[in-house]
Image: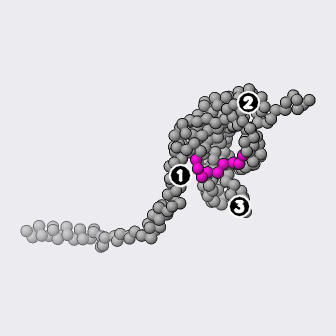
């Protein structure tokens, strides 16, 4: 019995030494921060923005996003002619189709604050991917820059990523052909050939640079495919008729 009591006392002593002197005190939740966050989430502006974003799943053209200003100068069979006012884009070159995600991420990052001023800017539309038939492996992705930031005192902030460049797009005449669905490379090529054929049959306009065209994409990736708005765009010039030359 004495040996058993000694072992019990020794065990009790070790347990007391190894146990913490007191249990850690749980930090009380920041009730004000929680209520502030909840109020923001449930605010009318936030609820409206969330509702609009969800509704964009079904919209051909999303609401609330700025796009470059243009006027429709005319139409033809399967296309329209737009005259775009000057605007600025942020661009990134891409060497392969698998880099689409990298290009989008770099440009979106710049727009949302990854720049020298850490300035967050608004998302715009469309996202443009430019193609050149003479260099099929080289493409360029572009985001339209928000016009509000063009009017800022310092203008647009400089990118931190050296692969992102700012470029001023001059006023230009563009032939545009709309098509739905997912804009794969093969589909983009097919639709560009369709637009070129329509322009040739129409006879009033010709591409300024042979083999150059762009696809304009207006929708977030979760939009239903048959509701997506895609456009093939080719910069054109009006042909001079024989009567005008005479």
Report how far apart the C-alphas of labels 2 and 1 lie in the structure.
Answer: 37 Å
Query: Does residue 13 appear in the picture of this structure?
Result: yes
Residue placed under numbered mark 2 in the picture? 199
Where residue 13 appears, as percent x and y from the top left, is 22, 71
Does 53 sit above or below residue 129? below
Mark 2–mark 3 distance (CA, rounded to whole Å): 40 Å
Q: Secondary structure at mark 1?
A: helix
Residue 181 within the magenta-colored segment of the rendering: no
Instruction: Please name the residue shown 60% across and 40% down the image.
Output: 229
Q: Nearer the viewer, residue 239 or 162?
A: 239
Residue 64 magenta-highlighted: yes
Q: Is residue 219 left or right of residue 3?
A: right
Please state the total of marks drawn on the protein image.
3
Neighbour tally class for label 1: few under 14, some 14-19, many 20 plus, Cα within 10 Å: some
**Residue position marked by numbered label 1 in the rendering:** 52
Comes first in the chain, label 2 or label 1: 1
């Amino acid at each position: 019995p004495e040996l058993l009591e000694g072992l019990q006392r020794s065990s009790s002593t070790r347990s007391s030494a190894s146990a913490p002197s007191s249990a850690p005190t749980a930090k009380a939740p920041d009730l004000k921060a929680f209520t502030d966050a909840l109020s923001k989430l449930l605010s009318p502006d936030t609820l409206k923005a969330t509702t609009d974003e969800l509704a964009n799943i079904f919209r051909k053209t999303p609401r609330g996003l700025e796009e470059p200003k243009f006027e429709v100068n005319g139409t033809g069979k399967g296309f329209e002619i737009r005259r775009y006012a000057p605007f600025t884009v942020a661009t990134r070159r891409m060497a392969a189709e698998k880099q689409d995600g990298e290009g989008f991420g770099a440009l979106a990052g710049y727009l949302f604050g990854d720049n020298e001023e850490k300035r967050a800017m608004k998302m715009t539309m469309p996202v443009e991917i430019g193609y050149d038939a003479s260099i099929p492996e080289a493409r360029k992705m572009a985001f339209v820059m928000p016009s509000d930031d063009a009017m800022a005192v310092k203008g647009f902030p400089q990118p931190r990523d050296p692969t992102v460049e700012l470029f001023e797009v001059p006023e230009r005449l563009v032939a545009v052909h709309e098509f739905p669905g997912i804009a794969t490379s093969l589909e983009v090529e097919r639709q560009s050939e369709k637009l070129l054929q329509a322009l040739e049959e129409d006879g009033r306009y010709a591409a300024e640079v042979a083999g150059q065209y762009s696809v304009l994409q207006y929708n977030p990736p979760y939009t239903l495919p048959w509701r997506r708005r895609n456009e093939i765009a080719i910069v054109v010039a009006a042909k001079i008729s024989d009567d005008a030359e005479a």
